[in-house]
Image (cartoon, rainbow, N blue to C red):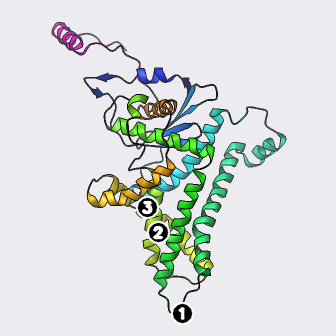
Amino acid sequence: MQDTISYKTIVSRVKVSKGKQHMKRCSVGGQAVMEGVMMRTMSGGIALAVRKADGSIETEYTPKKDTGKNPILKWPVVRGVVAFVDSLATGMKMMTRSAELYGEAIEEEPSRFEKWIAKKTGKDVMDIAIIVAVILAAGLAIGLFVLLPSLVTQLIHWQDGSPRIWKSLVEGFVRLFIFLGYITAISMMKDIRRVYMYHGAEHKTIACYEHDAPLTPENAMKYSRLHARCGTNYLFLVMAVSILFFAMLPYAENLFLRVLTRLVFLPLVAGLAYEVLKLAAASDALWARIIRAPGLGLQYLTTREPEPAMLEVAIAAFNLAIYDGVLPQEEPVTDTNETTQAVATEEANEEPKKVEE
């Protein structure tokens, strides 16, 4: 489903009556993409809204695929691994699609090479590009956050008899330092800063909804750009849980075995971090606030204050997501007292009618 719509059309379809929004309550998450925002619900599909080069907002909605109801996928820890893999794949796909919608991808006749690739693989060139991008990103992540910390730890001159747990802890903190340095470095790039502004718009929109306020840029701008369920919190928890988890395992002196161990247990670490995040986000106890604090602090790097136009895009994606891709028809807004009186009169005089199909 694809449509080009204006912001005013979307907002006008969100009916507010008696101070309460007629929206279904659901858990909503999202991601900033190139000049846009992706939103999704737990039960629905994926909504994408992008501000095109001509200033219009273009939206797409992808219904959720029916993958069956395997109870194993709902188990604690396992569901975290599934969510981690799915978010990576979906995020890469939406980032690529947003670039196309924005106008970065020029519509032109496929080259001979592109036609040859499509013929040999049976896949679209863009699908191949996504696969290659995922492989390169995975290689970069392994090199920076697994191999490099292990190399740094191995280069340290350890005294004979040094406890192996110290080596694991040092490696973990080196990994955390590299992660923080990476986040800080890319935040200085102009294009990444705009993505971080849309990230802030995503958070403000969700917060506005959670506080039962009408979804407008003016209202959303009042809320914090930080959010407890942000993926930044999750990534930090993955780093923190990995430090504790690998400190409890025997330390492999062989570099290859040590890197292999980190990769093998990464899904388990990701699943454990997901459960910690889920518990911390659902509680306001002291322990939960302590766990959330580092990730919230890190969001000062991964989010920026958005422009009103960016909030318009985030609201467009949000509304499309919670209505499962079908926005309700616009209805005229009338005075509450007049409406109540009219309804009461109509009900008193109402006669049974046939329902026309």
Horizontal and vertical percent position of residue 283: 28, 53
Residue 336 shows in the view: yes
Q: Amino acid at mark 2?
A: Ser
Using the image, tell me which numbered label, if any, was put on residue 237. 3
Which of discs 2 and 1 lies nearer the camera? The answer is 1
- Contact between labelled residues 1 and 2, with CB atoms less than 8 Å apart: no
Residue 72 shows in the view: no
Q: How many angstroms separate mark 1 from mark 3 (CA)?
A: 32 Å
Q: Residue drawn 27% across and 59% down? A: 286
Q: How many angstroms separate mark 2 from mark 1 (CA)?
A: 25 Å
Q: Amino acid at mark 1?
A: Asp
Q: Residue drawn 59% across and 55% down? A: 185
Tell whether position 344 is magenta.
yes
The C terminus lies in quadrant: top left
Q: Residues within 10 Å of mark 1 (few under 14, many from 20)?
A: few
Horizontal and vertical percent position of residue 291: 36, 60
Please say if 76 is above or below 8: below
Element on which disc 2 rests: helix
Residue placed most toward the observer, 174 or 246: 174
Residue beneath disc 2: 242
Q: Residue drawn 84% across and 41% down? A: 112
User: What residue range appears in magenta?
Assistant: 328-357
